[in-house]
Image: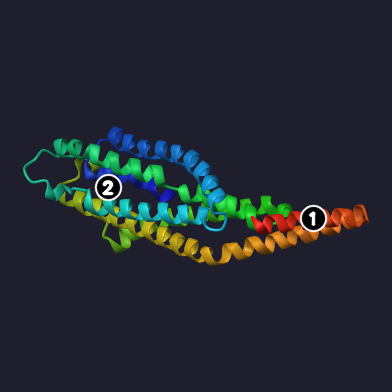
Amino acid sequence: MNANSLLILWFEYMGYAENHASELVSILLFCNCLSSLFFGWFGDYMHVKNSKYGRLLVALSVLSIQIVFTCLLYLDVPVHPDEMGDLNRDTKMMNLFPIFTGVLIVLGLFGDADQQCCDLPILADIVPHHIRGFAYSLLDMVQCFFAFLATVFVGVLAEDTFGFVHDKNKPIKDWDPTTRAINTRALGSALLTVNMVAMIGSLIIYGLMLYTYPKDVKEMAIMHDTMQRRRVEEDDGGSEGVALLSDDRNRRQDE
């Protein structure tokens, strides 16, 4: 989710310098690149193995992993400024850097994998070819709109629900420990809430698709055969083409 663009701020609130915060988010984005390539291939592989549920099972699995590591990132790993004791803040932050790196690598490798292996290929299976471009653009519009809403809601939740404190007179690096702790928790809680709502919602939708997708594919195949039959009858007017279409349909049903 694009609300994770605010991760840089969250790491800075926690105590990381701008360059270290940027490095952590860059690791996440680079792993997203690898994830897109791998899960695009893996989704195709699983579809060949199980044409009804292969892609959906991959999507459900990676979403479950995302939920676990998102909770780990925002709830378990962070050390807030008021919990550091006598240890130097910079030292503590750098000690945690490898841990954050590991969590973000996993999130990057599994983040958005459900979209690459599932969303567009499934649309291609259940949407008629003559409106497929519009369906793709509609899906992209919905995703962009929800990304916009997510970013807005993170800000609203951080300020109005979790108690973010504005300190316009000081840069982030000069915040006192109390302000830094409050704002770190506020932004982290807002990011966690928005991400969890999106992931759990996606989990529910993919779960429902386990029941609807096979039926939609079957209806799409019937519609395709009907259109092809009409086209053959109009072009040739003969029964040979129709017979070939029937054989092709029966073969797909057997598969």
Extreme residue toward the right, this view: 237
Give the SS element for disc 1: helix
How many marks can you see?
A: 2
Residue 127 seen from this side: no
**Viewer-side residue, 109 vs 238:** 238
**Callout 1 amino acid:** Leu
Quadrant where the image shows the C terminus: bottom right
Q: Nearer the viewer, residue 91 or 30?
A: 30
What x and y, as percent, mark residue 21? 30, 38
Q: CA distance from mark 1 to mark 2?
A: 71 Å
Determine which of the numbered discs, if any, sits on residue 64 in the image.
none
- Identity, as a three-letter code, of the amino acid under mark 2: Lys
Check disc 1: other Cα within 10 Å, few if <14, some if 14-19, many if 20+: some
Q: Answer with left or right where residue 89 lies relative to residue 24.
A: left
For this view, does 120 lie left or right of residue 21?
A: right
Mark 2: secondary structure? loop
Evaluate whether residue 221 shows in this view: yes
Marks 1,2: beta carbons within 8 A: no
Q: Residue 88: horizontal and vertical position, in percent?
A: 11, 38
Residue located at (18% from left, 48% from top): 79
The residue identified by callout 1 is 245
Q: Residues within 10 Å of mark 2 (few under 14, many from 20)?
A: few
Image quarter of residue 170: top left
Residue beneath disc 2: 168
Q: Please state the horizontal and vertical placement of residue 123, each as a whole percent of the image.
A: 61, 54
